[in-house]
Amino acid sequence: MLRHSSLPTVLVEGISDARGYRHLEKQLDVGRVSILPCGGRINLLKVFERRREIPSLPLAFIADRDMWLFRMPAGYEEIIWTTGYSLENDVLAAGAAEDLLEPGEMIRFRQSLDVLIPWFAFEVEEFLAGRTAHVDVHPDSVLPPDAMVIREAHYAGRGSGRGSDAMIKFIHDDYALRLRGKNLAYLLARFLNSPRRHAQYNPPTLLDAVVRLRPNLPHWQQILAAVKARLKAH
């Protein structure tokens, strides 16, 4: 498809990313642009590796750092990476979502973070040690609602399930960017989507609300500037 296109193209990982980045499309100011989901991170990286086969087409690649936030391999400097772990992090780091929490909800949210972050720190250290990190899970399967203890079954046979104090502090110091974004969004929605609330937000509507409330998200503006530079430099 790219070989037969003349339209500058921004390649993103998946359909949800494409929907999110369409908010940026209006601000690009480079004429018509195609935002193309690649069906996942692996496919995007494969297309990136073969980008020289279509030298005449202006291309920009946007990808989530994911666990590469903690150790980025060489060779991908031309990809435009999220500042934080993922697209969700770059949205939620603005703080607008937490502003929607009532005082009591904020207290429980902070308490939940204090339990979830040590678990995530453990998984980051597993990744850095070359082992498989199990982070692609719903927070409810790790930290049940209204519980303040990680499910033992989640890390049975894998060690303590708690990261080092240094890694816990590193993630906690900037959790909005360093904790897995989907986990953070679901944890916020645990409180913001409660049936007891008058206004409810699930993760997709929460992210959409933040983007609409804060159209000039600083980390998105960095991505916007990088995409503009890539497409105009071609």
Image: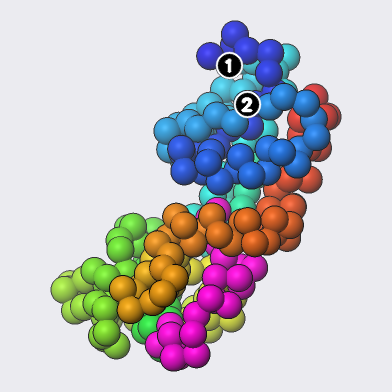
Q: Nearer the viewer, residue 208 or 80?
A: 208
Is residue 78 at all visible to an observer of this figure? no
- In screen coordinates, is 48 left or right of 161? right
Q: Give the range drawn in magenta.
A: 83-110
Between discs 1 and 2, the one toward the N terminus: 1
Amino acid of disc 2? Ser
Identity of the residue furthest to the front in this view: 198
- Where does the image place residue 144, in percent across and percent down from the top left? 24, 77
What is the crowding at mark 2: few (fewer than 14 residues within 10 Å), some, or many (at least 20)?
A: some
Disc sitting over residue 2 in the figure: 1
Is residue 15 at all visible to an observer of this figure? yes
Residue behind mark 2: 34
Identified at 61% across, 56% down, the residue is 211
Q: Which of 102 and 36 is in front in this view?
A: 102
- Where does the image place residue 41, in percent across and percent down from the top left? 46, 40
Identity of the residue furthest to the right in this view: 233
